[in-house]
Amino acid sequence: MKKIVTISLSLMMAFVLMSSQQVFAKDPVKIGVLVPLTGIVAQGGLEMKMGIEMAAEEKGTILGRDIKLYVEDTQVKPPIAVSKAEKLVYKDGCKALIGVFSSGVGLALASNIDKLKVPFLSTHVMTTEFYGIHPLVFRSGQLANDQTAVGNVKGIMARPDLKEKTYYVLVHDYAWGHDAGQRFIDLAKENGIKIYNEEYDRAPIATKDWSSYISKIKASGVDGVYIAFITNVIPVFAKQMSDFGLQGKVKTISAAAPGPLELEAGGEACFGIFGASDWSWDVDTPASNKWEMAFWEKYKTIPSDAAAHSYVGAMNLFNAIEKAGSTDAQAIAQALKGISFDGPYGNVRISAKDNCMRNSAVLTETMAAPENPFGAKVTMKVLHTFTAEELGPPE
Amino acid sequence: MNSTTSIPGISKRFYPLKIFAVILILCSLALFPFISDNRFYISLITEMMIYGLLAMSLDVLLGYTGLLSFMHNTYMGICAYAVGLFLIHISPTSLWLACFAGVVFTSLVALPVGWVQVRTGGLAFALLTLAFGMMFYTIVWKWYAVTGGDDGLMGMPNPDITLFGWHLGSSSDPVNIYLFTLTVVTICFFLTRRIINSPFGAVLEAIRENEDRASFVGINVRRYKLLGWMLACILASIAGALFILYKGYIGPSTMSAFAGAGVLMMVLLGGMGSLWGAFAGAFIFIYIQDYISTMTEHWEIFLGLFVIFLVLFLPTGFAGLGDYFKRFRKA
Amino acid sequence: MGELLCTENVCCHFGGVMATDNVCFRVNQNGLTSIIGPNGAGKTTFINIVTGKINASAGKIIFKEKDITNKSPHELVKMGICRTFQINSLFQNLSVFENLRIARQAMHGGSLRLFSSKQSLKAVTQDTWAMLEKLGLKEMAARPAKNLAYGDQRVLEVAIAMAGDPKILFLDEPTAGMSPAETLHISKMIKELAKDICVVLVEHDMDMVMSISDRITVLQNGGIISEGTPEEIRNNQQVREAYLGKEE
Amino acid sequence: MSGTFSIAIDLLLNSLVLSGVFLIVAMGLNIIYGLSRIMNMSHGALYAVGAYIGYSLVATGVNYFAALIITPILVGIIGLLIERTIILPMRKRSMVYTLILTYGLMFFLDGMIKHIWGNRPRFIELPEFMQGMISILGTQYPVYRLMTLFMIAAIMIALMLLLSKTKAGIIMRAASTIPEMVSCMGINMSYVHMGAFMLGCAMAGAAGIIAGPLTTIDPLMGGEMLISSFVVVVIGGLGSLRGAVIAAILIGFVQTFTEFFITDLAMVIVFIMMAVILAFMPRGLLGEGKFE
């Protein structure tokens, strides 16, 4: 008898809880934010969330209605991200999804977008598979792998000392890492840059102790290493390289921009990381400086490129909804094609041809930071600025 | 009362009431997708049913044969990958053939593993499941060319659900998947209940109660432990086939040690030794995990406290039959 | 009456300790043979070897002219070699009825039937009821084994071994911890059993052993020091020394 | 020629360092299991707590060596709190329940680490003389990694002395073989269990602060170390301290060499070894494993 009571009770409780959530407030424009708040990239996810929240606050209202952000933690796990997206769209009624850090999660969402039927704008997914993947899927964020590869190879060719080096390629073992590594190797071979291991090495994302990989690099006798690691892990790898005395001897070139907070933690050991990325707080333009100070006042943490991309992506999305005049998915998608926004790193335009952004970028190298309001010890010094056309892909 | 063929100890009281409760629950579940068109709850309940089936398969092992498995979700994952690869590479339309191939493949994998597993018992058995589970997890994670590594299987087609040529609907629509899952899970539930109450089930319970004595009563303990293991793995692989049809995606994180312990908690939450308890445990665990993680960034703290509270103050789980586990208790 | 079971210099050692030392032991079709000896004489170890709980290091065991050395317990039980345990080893949470029924089912076959209900094995259920009747455990049929009184649990222990239709039954100190009345009841039952099957009794209770045994074997330090009828053993010099120690 | 020779030295030293860390963590796990039959799933989290406490101490100016002493004590006290509040009532319960309880504790500790220290990777500021390189047999090797070997050796010697010479140590060793007998001799077993749990947690803390500078201090470091320490403990034989020494060295070398040569399948091989040992030698390499 006791058993029957407990089971019917628990089912009743479930139904009551479910139905009680259909309360109707004055309906704001609901936007679903998917960022990793736990797991290896939690810091990057937090910075993305800050960028989007800052954009929402700055924008204020869309079509006269408030903006309501629903934030969910993807835990960098594709199955969890898909269920959270379903919750955001079906339960919370979000009209658009924004965010997503890793390519794996981005691709999983893209393959489920027909069920969700809402536009999805990624602000940190770099895989080249996103070009024209789906009419409802857009990218306005970090440079794609092909653009970064172009930036890095151009940067290497421009410096005679880097051009002669032989590069050892080491990537994180997931979709983005393979894509970034392969892109660089193909482009480098075209330009005559020597690659030591064309079958690039793959390291698990959770790797903490890089000593076995570093001994391989030491054994190979190369004088350069090209790494495609998640932003937060780059300074950690650089620190262990310097622990093993390779900092001076082996030049590190990175496919992604290292996170500023991690650079601070790494300190001097992280000097000398070379690589193309969208933005760093060393960029000296009025728009960039204004945005940096606004971010610093609001969050009291060093402004990072993850925050900048998400801010710009959010602004593009909000403006597109404004332009579309409604929250209908197809209308927003139509408005997103070709929309552009002048943010911290110049004009960012979403190409109508392949739904992915085109924007200028900078070539940076980490070194001691000059006097700055953020108290940062390490900066990503801007060496050269690339125009959008230079990085491609052609339209 | 003691006619020569009746078996004492099986309470016949409230039998009609039990049947009524079961029918009530099944009907309400069957009608739910038509009552509320909120697709989030439809897919949430589908996920709960799938994990309920997986928890029940673990309960066949833990609650009825007394064998603790840390990573029973490994065999769900293997079957999901097998079904997915079959649909992607061999034939994107034949749903039943893919599921059948998946279950058969998983059984072929589970058999040799089971042969090694049943040579041990108690904690050694549990740690061995962890070792094999982590081995399959690492293989799936590293075999990038076939399994897509950390990003999981991409490009899953959505075959139509057809029964003897009768077209029921495409598997991309959540309501069809919900009903398909409900029927398959209900069939598995009643089949397993039948098996548990059969002479074979009695042998499993004897092994759980006292493995040593069982071999001295003429039971070939290793063979029956292996059969119990195969039954549990086949049920888990069915859950795997349902999972990939529902989710359209499978990744290594579903096969991880972290998820494996989650399934174990569902069984403990629902109370070991009761098949429907496993379903209750799955329903409650998934609802709480989903609910807490949206509430706060630090959901791990609360999930940890919840588990500690559960083990300290409610060891027998909600269904109150956990004391089947006396055998392990040292008192 | 032909010889049922015989062991040819069976040995077993744990590390340096020689627990069973070249034991040659013979039993006939029926009758009650007792094995006595001081603590640590290797009685239980010898039974464990014959019933397959532990493996013999050397020597052979012949049962009905077939070599059964180091066979696994369930094969031996199928052949009719059953045993009870010194410390109760029952299916605690299962009912008394189920304890016996599972033993009958294991012998009777039908364990592989996945889809039929337990009741469908009619012969098994009827045998179990009959056995409960005979042993007077009928009223407690539905109670879990763990709730039984200690004496009843000992009776159930013997009953489970009996359920296996044994040709030869090893009883390991069945009367341990029992009241005199219960001991009498059990010894009457054992005497009854020994009429048609062979029973081997390991016991400390001297007067019980002397009163009901047909033959007695005395073990010390793993080896047999003497064998014979109860009278021969009672006034055997070696046996007295083994028990009481040498008079200085 | 000198290239392959220096690689060999590198690999050898890296393996020794990894084996050392595995050894300290596995010892802690074995002491807790050996004595109170508890498989502490939160052992990895305590290892991470040790690393973070070490980091905070050094960051607030405490001398590194002082931190090396204080951290295990602090983690031991945390272990004491845990033992008295949630492990003690579990004393009579079955192994499964303590497994799940410590699993919940792992969640709780990981969550608290994230709450207190945030997600950023942290680095321990080593004293000046430890940061450089030293040339050994012609190859450059970080000074700190050599220091680790000495520190681990020191801890092992201290543990051996504790277990063999002190009264408490002997009681613990006796209790791990026959717990009932020790309580018959009038020793309060609950204090012995408490002592064992504290010592086990202190070992995890020590491993944390030592391994901190070697790898990265971030909230996920606990999870990986837990799986590796399970492998070492199982292969060495559950509860067998000597077995853990051999297994730690074996796994340290196998993992480092396989990661160097066949990076992909490194962990698969380790798990296959664990499976073989469990299935065919459940008592571990030395046959001293204790199961219930």
Image (spheres, rainbow, N blue to C red):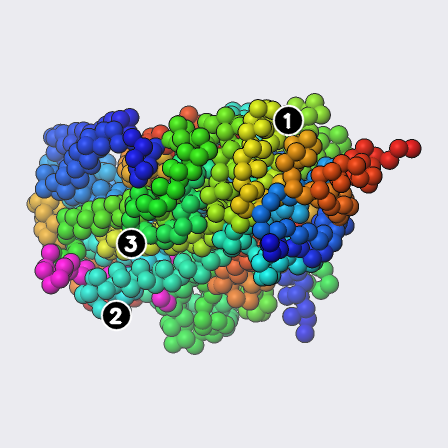
For the question of whether residue A85 can be seen, the reply is no
Q: Nearer the viewer, mark 2 or mark 1?
A: 1
Which-is-in-front pick, marks 2 and 3?
A: 3
Q: Is residue B37 left or right of residue D222?
A: left
* Residue B152 lies in the magenta-colored region: yes
Residue to which mark 1 is pinned: D189
Can you see residue C14?
Answer: yes
Calculate the distance from the C-alpha at mark 1 to the C-alpha at mark 3.
48 Å
| Residue linked to disc 2 | B90
Q: Are marks 2 and 1 in contact (CB under 8 Å)?
A: no
Is residue D53 placed above or below D230 in the rendered structure? Answer: above
Q: Amino acid at mark 2?
A: Ile
What residue lies at 17% left-to-right and 33% top-to-bottom? B20
C238 part of magenta stretch: no
The kind of secondary structure element at disc 1 is helix
Q: Residue at x 31, y 43 (%)?
A: C119
Crowd rating for badge 1 (residues with CA inside 10 Å; few <14, some 14–19, many 20+): some
Of the numbered discs in the image, which one, if any, rests on residue C72? Answer: none
Image quarter of the C terminus of chain A:
bottom left
**Residue C233 place in picture, x, y as percent:** 75, 40
Which residues are drawn in magenta? B145-168
- For residue D266, side relative to residue B69 (left or right): right
Outermost residue, left direction? A325
Q: Identify which residue, C184 or D246, lies in the foreground.
A: C184
